[in-house]
Image (cartoon, rainbow, N blue to C red):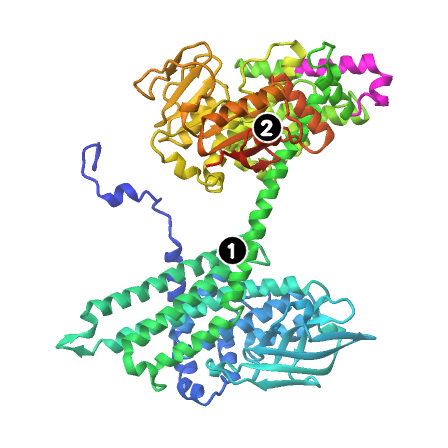
């Protein structure tokens, strides 16, 4: 081999940095734009905009409008505007970098902000789509011959604005006032947002400064003296209908404007930050204290380093927001990153101002130096486009709505799959050939499904029953073939065209559940976390024709959708059950339980173990996770009991050790005593946890890999077990008497203050879903306790704090907890 080969020495950078040679970072792109901005506009800012800025600020004189006309002549005003109106069509990232660089070079931090305001007013007019407005105003705005600003702020909700518009014939009459408008003192036109008196909708109008009844008023402010801050008073301003920029939903347009303005305000803050840091270091450079340069003192180096950190962290958030403006998937009305960028940049600017003031000493308080002006002006930039508290409020509201929406989507997606199971059980119940063992549960499902009174089913009972039986035969043959590793080339014939009415809907749901179960077991469903073509989805998993049939069945069941390019992608609410983890195990267990339960009902097979009971087997991991990460702190005193020497966790699931393993994995340093109907071998499944198996044949043993001792004990829990926690799935107890007995035995084994937790079935509220869940559980050898039965048994055993500690309708489980008095 040449070069370093297998034995040549490599540098860490060669190993860690494996980017493609042609890859260019966002920083590199931004630096190129910065250089372009300095080359094209630097001289204009330094030679035209800056001279006189100190005294304009001192005298509170706004910028001269002619500055913007010169900016227009250089192409600065049209830099990011569309080419069809004379602009260059550059994106918002590039424009944001230009705004930052102009702010850095400028002695007047408001200048860059005003440039952007007029540019975005131009965009507001363009977005109206009104040719008359565009032709009349846009050319002058692009050229800088006119300057426009926006006015919405009234310190109240938009639908409670005092500023109103009233339609009289074909003329709009405007009244009210808009405060805190940047550039109000010298602007030629305003885009103002007002409330429609008739509809209470928000409308937007284009108002000229010379319209009768329009009065711009100067506003005294702490800083930003050259920005021409002011308010606009409207008194019976009469405008033609052509001046209405948006006839409806102007609030959405305002939100879009605010999203961009926040980012651009942050860009102005970045430039001001960069400039003040550079000026601060330059001012400190010649100073000496104690014979040493001030810049050589560690505390000064540390302060300068903090300022640089603040600048770069602010840049990171602002550039992330700017880069997001180029994505077609961004929210057009609320950009979380823009809000974060504006808030973070403002907070960084305040801290930099404090550091500069501390480094500059007495000079920092003198108006002859730029430091105190920076502090005053930066506060003005902070207050624009939403106060810091308002930004946090909006972020909080958005976060809550997003998280609640995510939870609703997840629960809805899982419930949608559960509803497919209704049809699955209804068809199996309808095709059931008789037998006394599950007769009541089967009859309840048939009744809840409406098949006992269905005209469709009764009128064609022999044919319908035969068609249902044949459909289920094909379904179970498919499951068996897939599990045997011999999947068919194509999906068997489904229920399309075989049935009518209610039976057709139930059959469609059953087929959807079949497709969901097979797709989940084969890994096809998890592959759809990302959009896939049929070929991509089927690769190395299934024959393409079979995969396509399953995908189409999943689309029909609303479990999967097609994107704009025709690719298949899973419902986003299913992500948490497809990415792996405890929730995915529970989802898989429920699907498998339905498929296997249907087969048992058809074939009359005996129940195999307790792994399919509610709260056991595949659901154990999810419930153990809930116990530790959601309930541990809510079960009073339990964390302290688990730390007590000799304390144990008792598990009476009897599901082959699966629940015990999950409890040991989630509570790894407390021994778990598992009651099992027969000896089991667990290997090292429980990780670091110690698991003791107590069997009912008189022998006890410790599973290999967990401890060195053997235990020879029999029966249930005993008082000497010193249980801090007892885990007792209620669905495995066949009748109320055995439930009371099991609760009593577990209570005696609890330490004072110990907790008994019972996973219990939580049937759906819909009648068919509840009946199907009971049949499902009956086939697994369990039952659903009656309302109040578990709570009554706990109270009768002398336990207190009896309550439903947690429930999950999508999972179909609730955890009832009770505490032994201390």
Identify the mark nearer the N-term, 1 or 2: 1
Height in image: 52 above or below 724?
below
Magenta span contains residue 463: yes
Residue under circle 1?
326
In this view, the residue in front, 331 or 753, is 753
Which mark lies nearer to you, 1 or 2? 2
Q: Position of residue 85 (x, y in %)?
A: 59, 68
User: Do tag 1 and tag 2 residues touch (Cβ < 8 Å)?
Assistant: no
Q: Secondary structure at mark 1?
A: loop
Residue 394 pos. (x, y %): 55, 60
Alpha carbon distance from label 1 to label 2: 62 Å
Residue placed furthest toward the bottom:
59
Can you say which quadrant of the picture contains the N terminus? top left
Residue for badge 2: 793
Q: Residue at x 39, y 34 (%)?
A: 642
Residue lying at the far left in this picture: please name it. Answer: 291
Question: Please, what is the dominant secondary structure of the magenta stretch?
Answer: helix
> Considering depth in this image, is 60 or 48 the residue closer to the camera?
60
- Decide: few, some or many residues near mark 1? Use Cα within 10 Å; few <14, some 14-19, many ≥20: few
Left or right, residue 690 beside residue 488: left
**Is 346 rendered above or below residue 24?**
below
Residue 76 in view, yes or no: no
SS type, badge 2: helix
Residue 593's tag is: none
The image shows residue 171 at horizontal and vertical percentages of: 79, 76
Above or below, 103 relative to 220: above
Let me know if residue 275 is in the magenta part: no
**Mark 2 packing: few (<14 Cα in 10 Å), some, or many (20+)?**
some
Q: Is residue 263 visible?
A: yes
Q: Residue at x 65, y 31 (%)?
A: 788
Please give the range of residues in magenta. 449-474
């Amino acid at each position: 081999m040449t070069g370093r080969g297998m034995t040549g020495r490599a540098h860490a950078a060669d190993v860690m940095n494996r980017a493609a040679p042609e890859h260019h970072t966002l920083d590199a792109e931004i630096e190129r734009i910065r250089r372009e901005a300095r080359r094209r506009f630097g001289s204009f800012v330094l030679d035209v905009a800056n001279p006189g800025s100190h005294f304009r600020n001192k005298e509170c004189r706004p910028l001269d409008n002619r500055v913007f006309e010169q900016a227009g002549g250089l192409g600065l005003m049209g830099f990011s505007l569309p080419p069809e109106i004379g602009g260059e069509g550059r994106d918002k990232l590039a424009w944001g970098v230009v705004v930052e660089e102009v702010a850095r070079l400028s002695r007047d931090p408001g200048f860059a902000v005003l440039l952007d305001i007029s540019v975005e007013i131009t965009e507001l007019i363009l977005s109206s789509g009104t040719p008359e407005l565009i032709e009349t105003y846009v050319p002058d705005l692009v050229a800088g011959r006119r300057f426009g600003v926006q006015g919405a702020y009234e310190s109240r909700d938009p639908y409670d604005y005092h500023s109103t518009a009233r339609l009289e014939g074909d003329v709009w009459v405007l009244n009210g006032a808009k405060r805190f408008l940047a550039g109000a003192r010298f602007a030629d036109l305003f885009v103002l947002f007002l409330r429609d008196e008739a509809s209470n909708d928000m409308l937007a109008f284009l108002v000229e400064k010379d319209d009768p009844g329009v009065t711009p008023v100067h506003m005294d402010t702490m800083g930003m003296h050259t920005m021409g801050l002011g308010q606009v008073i409207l008194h019976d301003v009469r405008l033609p209908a052509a001046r209405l920029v948006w006839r409806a939903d102007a609030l959405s347009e305002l939100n879009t404007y605010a999203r961009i303005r926040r980012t651009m305000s942050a860009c102005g803050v970045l430039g001001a930050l960069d400039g003040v840091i550079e000026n601060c270091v330059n001012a400190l450079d010649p100073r000496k204290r104690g014979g040493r340069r001030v810049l050589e003192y560690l505390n000064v180096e540390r302060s300068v380093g903090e300022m640089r950190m603040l600048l770069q962290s602010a840049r990171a958030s602002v550039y992330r927001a700017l880069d997001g403006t180029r994505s077609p998937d961004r929210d057009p009305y609320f950009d979380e990153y823009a809000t974060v960028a504006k808030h973070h940049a403002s907070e960084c600017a305040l801290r930099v101002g404090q550091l500069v003031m501390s480094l500059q000493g007495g000079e920092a308080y003198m108006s002859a130096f730029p430091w105190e002006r920076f502090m005053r002006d930066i506060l003005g930039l902070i207050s624009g486009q939403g106060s810091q508290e308002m930004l946090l409020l909006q972020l909080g509201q958005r976060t809550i709505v997003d998280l609640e929406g995510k939870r609703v989507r997840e629960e809805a997606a899982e419930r949608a799959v559960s509803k497919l199971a209704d049809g699955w059980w209804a068809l199996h119940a309808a095709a059931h050939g008789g037998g006394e063992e599950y007769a009541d549960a089967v009859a309840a499902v048939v009744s809840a499904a409406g098949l006992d009174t269905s005209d469709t089913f009764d009128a064609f009972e022999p044919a319908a029953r035969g068609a249902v039986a044949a459909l289920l035969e094909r379904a179970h043959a498919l499951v068996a073939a897939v599990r045997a590793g011999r999947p068919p080339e194509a999906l068997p014939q489904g229920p399309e065209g075989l049935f009518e009415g209610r039976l057709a809907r139930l059959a469609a749901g059953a087929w959807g559940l079949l497709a969901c179960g097979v797709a989940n077991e084969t890994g096809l469903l998890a592959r759809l976390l990302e959009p896939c073509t049929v070929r991509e989805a089927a690769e190395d998993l299934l024959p393409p024709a079979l995969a396509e049939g399953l995908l189409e069945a999943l689309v029909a069941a609303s479990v999967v959708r097609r994107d704009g390019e025709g690719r298949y992608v899973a419902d986003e609410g299913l992500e948490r059950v497809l990415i792996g983890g405890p929730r995915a195990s529970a989802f898989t267990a429920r699907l498998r339980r339905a498929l296997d339960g249907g087969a048992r009902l058809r074939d009359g097979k005996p129940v195999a173990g307790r792994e399919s009971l509610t709260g056991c087997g595949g659901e154990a991991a999810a419930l153990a996770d809930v116990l530790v990460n959601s309930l541990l702190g809510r079960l009073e005193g339990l964390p302290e009991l688990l730390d007590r020497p000799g304390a144990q966790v008792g598990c009476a699931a009897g599901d082959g050790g699966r629940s015990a393993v999950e409890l040991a994995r989630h509570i790894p340093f407390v021994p778990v005593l598992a009651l099992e109907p027969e000896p089991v071998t667990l290997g090292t499944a429980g990780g670091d946890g110690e698991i003791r198996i107590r069997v009912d044949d008189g022998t006890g043993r410790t599973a290999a890999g967990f401890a060195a001792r053997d235990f020879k004990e029999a029966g249930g829990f005993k008082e000497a077990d010193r249980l801090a926690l007892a885990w007792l799935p209620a669905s495995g107890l066949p009748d109320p008497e055995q439930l009371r007995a099991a609760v009593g035995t577990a209570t005696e084994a609890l330490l004072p203050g110990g907790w008994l937790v019972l996973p219990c079935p939580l049937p759906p509220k819909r009648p068919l879903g509840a009946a199907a869940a009971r049949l499902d559980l009956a086939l697994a050898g369990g039952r659903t306790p009656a309302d109040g039965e578990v709570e009554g048994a706990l109270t009768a055993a002398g336990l207190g704090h009896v309550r439903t500690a947690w429930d999950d309708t999508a999972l179909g489980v609730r955890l009832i907890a009770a505490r032994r008095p201390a």
